[in-house]
Image: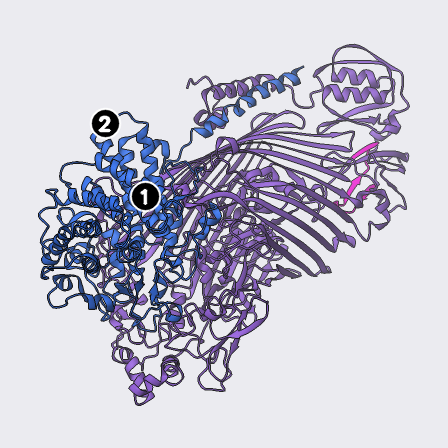
Chain colours: A blue, B purple
Amino acid sequence: MKTKLKIYVLLGVILPLFIGCNSELDDLKPHDVLTTEALTSTVKGLQQLTTTSYSMMYLPLSVGDIGKTGLTDVVFNIGETKGNTVTFPQEFDVVDGSVANTQDAFYYVNSATNTDGLSNSAWELSYELIVNTNTVLEAIEKRSDVATNATVKELKGTNLFLRAWSYFNLVRIFGRPYWDNPDTNLGVPLKLTNNPNDMPQRATVKECYDQIIADFKAAAELLPETAAPNRTLANRYAALGLLSRVYLYMGGSFSAPNAASNQLAVDAATSVINWAGASPLPDLDEATFNQEPTANKEFLWAYAMTNIANSSWSNVGFNFYPYFGMGGEIGLSDEFLANIDQENDKRFLLYVGENENGITTTLKYSGEWGLKKSGWGFYTINPEPLIRVGEVYLNRAEAYVKLGKNTEALADLNAIRVRSGLTALTGISGQALFNAIFEERARELVCEGQNGFDFFRNNLTMTRKYASYLPGNDITSISPTDNRVIMPIPIREVNLAQLKQNPGY
Amino acid sequence: MKKTINNTLHYLLFIPHILFTRNIKVYLLMAFIFSGQLLFNDVYGQNIETKVSYELKNQSLEAGLNKLGKVSNLRISFVLSQVEKYNNITIEKGTRSIKEILNSLLSNTNLTYAIKDKSILIIAKASKSTQTNNTSVPVKPKTVEGRIIDADDRPVAFVNVTVNGKNKGAITDADGNFTLDNLVPEDVLNISYIGYEKREIPVGNNAFISIVLNEKSTALSEVIVTGYSTKKASEITGSAQQISGDVLRAGITTTDGLSALKGLVTGVYIVNSNPNPATYATSQVRGQSTLLGGTDPLTGNFAPHLLQNGPLIVVDGVISNFANIAQVASMSDIESITVLRDAASTAIYGSKAGAGVIVVTTKKGKKGETKVSVETQLGFSTPYVLKDKFMTTDQWHDYTKQSVRYAYKYGEGATTLQKKYATEELYIQNRLAGLYSNFDLTQNYDWTNQSLQNGVTKGINATISGGNESTTWYFGVNSVGVDGSEPQDKYNRNSIRAKLDHKLTKFLVVGGNFSTIFENATFNTQRYQNLGINYQPFNNPYNADGTIKTSLLSWTGPGRPVATKLLANPLFDGQYNDRKNKSNNFSGSLYGKVTFAPGLTFTSTNTWGVYNNTQNTILDRRTIQGNNPLYTPNNGMLTVEFNNVYSYLTSNVLNYKHLFNDVHSLNLIGGQEWGYKTIHPNYIIRTDVLEGERDLSATSSSMNNGQLVSPVGITREKANFSLFAQADYNYNSRYLLSASWRNDATSNFSRNSRYHSFYSVSAGWMVSQEKFWKSLKDIVPTLKLRASTGIAGKDAGADFLNYSLYKKPGSSTDYLGTEIGQGYYATQIANTDLTWEITKILSYGLDISLLKNDRITLSFDGYRNNCVNLIQQTSVSSLKGVDMQYTNAAYLRNRGLELSLATKNIDGKDFKWQSHFTISHNKNNIISTVLPSDEKGYILSMGGYLRVDDDINTVRAIKYVGIDAQTGKPLFEKVNEDGSITQVNSVTEAGESYQIIGSSTPTVYGGFTNNFTYKNLELSVVATYSFGAITTNSFIAQYDGTTYTTQNLLAPQWLTYWKNPGDNAYLPSPRIDNPYGTYMLSTSSLNYQSADNVKIANIRLAYSFPKTLLGKLKMDGIKLYVSVDNVYTFTSSHYMGVDPEQGSYQGNGSGQGVTGGSTSMFSSGVLGAPRQYVTGLLFNF
């Protein structure tokens, strides 16, 4: 009997040890990281996540992205290298052999392999940013204080704004131009939640634009009405300025314009131009990129560089960086140099110069102010303009000319010309005026990631007269119907999300 | 907490529960202890006064005795032939003392009983005459009966019992009984049996003799520690190999037990070729069983770059936090090391055992006289370095000129160049202008030979142990200091271990095991071994007046401004910069063992561990490393890292051992473990540091090169809960069965997938114990077959992979200077399905010994391990929000064969020669993996690819054929779509023509040890080998891509290059116009070379002083020895370094060593582990 008793006592002692273990293990939580719930339950946390979206624009943060370039860089790169204003000088010291021609956006997928090209980066980084904004927006939906809490209201506006900006980038990189059957041509998947299992297929180009417009409009309502105190954050007039560009992209070609969209572009642009924060049109000397961006009246929204941003070598400035071997792969094309009045155009003096290797390139991103501020002594942190007043004038000019309002168009064009030290044009209209506006755009917005889109959204064939470093050097003319006008959907996304590939790839 | 218990020892024993478990448990445990004392105090033992309930109805004496044995829990032994004649005994039901019952049972017989050890022996009553046998009256011859049992009370059959000097003998029956007649008291019985120690027993007055035979310590009779239990080798059903501490210590002189194991055990691939004395060996049991990455055992980081696939280390039954033996036990404290390789042995460790288990047992005190052992070691080491093989200044200059000349004469732009420059020499002068204006080419400094040093090794070990009937104790002190081959490399290790076991009462033993290890290491901040490659010979570190230059210029290549790159002068910087690494490892176990009844015990082991590691790295402001004037001035940089790990593990095991009917042996184990660990890694970088200052508070800036550096500090918690059970059964040591089960839960995974069960089933057949084997017994004394199957696992992954997690970016600049900074970004998205990595194991083997005295012992093992659910960080669609996620994706298979052969070649009286040979083969296959489409070349750890059917370490590269003697261009194989092969001149043209050229893990490896003894002199030679692996050739890599050079290279007599048409050279011409494409050679087979090697790891000559001398000195032994380590490494003739294993993965387990991490894949092999000469003196008294 005693033996049995001993065993009972023993079991009685041991068994309680086995109970409740699950909850003890559940009690352990990660310390140095936060869970989604923890982060989205506070306004501070939502602010943090929103800041993350800004950070993602220049610094890829996700696990698989280490070493990749930042999102704004990618977008600028694609927009620019598909255009006709820059070139890849091959005058590098042969010993280094870093041939940049693979960055040309027409070089298949603009990288040596089809898995890590710029198109891939644009896709990945954009969707990471989009899902991040969705996380914040979903959390805000659950709150009841959007109307009453100014911070929450602004956060909602900011996230809608950033989401619209990202979708706009995606649809112009991966979707056919708007004049080309937007109801049937495919844009990109419209992912509007943060649920990992929500895996939408590609929406049509039109659906994408509808979403972009809805988001920008809502953002414009929510974002601060007062003069943007900080032109490096999302704000109402940045949303309107970008809307003018979005509508312009929908406005068709000069020969087949869409009046409704062009009128909307004009309206959006006008509300910016009439805004006290942007009028009168800032003088070019004042509006240089080479100063603190937060209060620069030229900028509606610019991406501000901080030291860290530039030190990652993942930004636009890097491509135009004046020192050999550390960027500086991109020079200005002969066509651009022929298109600009090198004597009188102040923009030539301000923005164009030679880098260390004798390559003519832009100085937009490498002025002395930024040089000093970076603290590095050898490269600078000038801001990246995402929408600025000069562009809005040109947006309106183009929309006007497509609406047949030649006088208004000419006035806007001349505003930009005159502030650049050029003479005002007179007596032109129609196609000639459109051409003048188009050329002005190339001069004004050079190296801001626009030229590549400008040709094809206008259904124009781009002819490159300078040597191209494409395989075989044979491509000099790109028709707007060419498959290569838009980028391939990244192979991994085609495989992992079963997305339809763009034709020709 | 109410202090209701007064008994201090009990209190101490259960402190863990007081501290770490819920109060309810504590009270219950207290109650248990308290009541336990009351209940069991007077029960256990052979107290025959104990009263039991007993009844016998007309039964035989045999039945009566058996019944008494059962009710009393006592062993009653008798000789059947003596007992079986008594029948029809009746004893009324009632409670009586055992003594009374025995007296009643034996009342009408000529038998009586005796109490011996734990048994009651039923014996014949002694006759009057024998009781007076010390008189001179001649005694009558008598009959003697006896029984022979082994140390575990099991009868031993077929034992030969002879009588000295008489032609007389008997053999024991199945129950171990024998009978001999016509004996006189002066007769001496001689008992001998294969595998057991001989015994001689005088007959004396005994009519019944019980003899215990002790097994001889042969390979199969050795007691092997298998974790929660110990077994005799003959009873092992799994694959386990034990090496005694003495054997380990007779090999290379090291502080790392794992390094010492190399070559001695099968199935374990061990590498330690690191010249730094503070780095530990790395090991892999039976092939790679997990994919890239694992959990750093110290920081808890899931570290994809860390190939943490080494085995689990268990010390004295306690699961350790470390991947290295050096961090848990000193060499001099090691009693034995057991390597568990298959499911039968490892599954009991469940989730942690997927990659094998190494069980370290430390020494403990023994009853008897106090033993003291002191060992002193003194030695020195010389660098084992690749000497005199690098280019001189002239050779380097010729090479560089050749690269320019080629462009001028044969390059694509030759015609243009020839127009521009009239002569070749003009062009050379132009291209190399920077070289001529900045460097003095008359200088010729030999960086390899002049930057390394001889080291000193000092060591003292002392152990004191002893004990009496109730207490045993052990103290070990160990102190070692080693200087490495590279300047500043120093390692210092001090440790203390104390063990105490005390028998508190008859049923309760308590004990403690305390260990502290202090390690101090200094590392240089530059790899001196690579200076011969990285610095050109004309870059003399000394000024003309003999003073050291404060900095050097770097040759950055033709056409480049030389001065834009300032090079640290290692000789100057080395005076001020180093990294000091201090770690303290404290571990304390308290345990209690309660014996409830014979064979039934409960053991609670409670262990606390504290590990503190501090690294202090200074880059002094006077040095280029600390203050490069070309960048934003740092004015010195101080990096301080702290890493603290606190752990607690309670392990509670119930064990029941019983032998039924003398032949059925059963051993049951049930237990539970709860482990908890907190980990605190922290680090801070500060700049603006005064000269020589190493304290954080003496610094002033957190800006490094203009970037803000923020401190990093993390707390991590991890907990595990486990239940386990094991059952071992054997029938007469002939048929062996074993099964184990374990259920683990870990905080790594989500609630739903947190639990997993691991199990094993195994069986063994001791063929040589069969009756039919009797005739073969002389030729094949032992033959055992065994097989096992089961699963073990790996709680790979950490950091709560089941949560979606957000983290602050490591660098912490503000966006626009707001207080928010860069926000939080998603580091992972939840995968709640994520679960354990599983290794499914099938293993079989046989053990055989041949000839008398086990002249040849052989163990053979084969296995197939299917490693499934391996965690891989796989690509997911970006639509999910991140593009990578951890999933259970991959499946690997390891198959292999292992052989261990020990022979006594010569076994003479004075001269003995013993050999031990081991060979292991492992074949790995990727069965499935995510992303098979990424089919680039290179090996996995270099960021390459995984492809189904390949070995995990397969190297695919573009095949290099040689050079075109006419053009000086390289030739590569391009595989066309139809499978045909054409030769092309560049890797770019070859495209994706990657072909398998080998694997970076060997196909066979092992060791060959020989021991020669002549009288008191011993000579041992340890050799290890490994064949079939390839390794990177970093000398070739220096020629890579940019084919002029900014570094130094192997001299052309070792590595020829093309100069003129018709030259038959190994390498193409260097070309300044580099047309071969970047990474020309690193993607080609040229970059790999055979890693085959045979190492004479150790030669040792020892002399033991003769006993006669020792008697006078009152000592037990004095041994003097001379030992040489890393004597020589024979390599393939194609190998260019000194030690191919340098190119294998090596780390120090914590991944923080100089060569830690996979970057050592690129280790050049310039410098191997140093050749070490040590003399030692060992005293035992």
Which of these two is toward me, B1091 or B378?
B1091
Q: Chain of mark 2?
A: A
Task: Look at the numbered disc 1 and give the secondary structure of its residue.
Answer: helix
Which residue: 32% across, 80% down? B443
Residues in magenta? B188-210
Q: Chain of mark 1?
A: A
Which residue: 31% across, 81% down? B441
Classify mark 1: residues with Cα within 10 Å, few (<14), some (14-19) or many (20+).
Answer: many
Q: Which residue is mark 2?
A: A147
Q: Give the amino acid at mark 2.
A: Ala
Q: Is residue B1041 left or right of residue A214?
A: right
Give the quadrant of residue B786.
Answer: top right
Which residue: 53% across, 57% down? B271
Q: Is residue A145 above or below residue A430?
A: above
Q: Which residue is mark 1?
A: A209
Label located before the other in sequence (1 or 2): 2
Which of these two is toward me, B400 or B1097?
B400
Res. A7 visible in picture: yes
Classify mark 2: residues with Cα within 10 Å, few (<14), some (14-19) or many (20+).
Answer: few
Q: Position of residue B822 (x, y in %)?
A: 27, 43
Say which of marks 1 and 2 sits in front: 1
Q: Position of residue B82 (x, y in %)?
A: 88, 27
Give the quadrant of residue A2.
Answer: top right
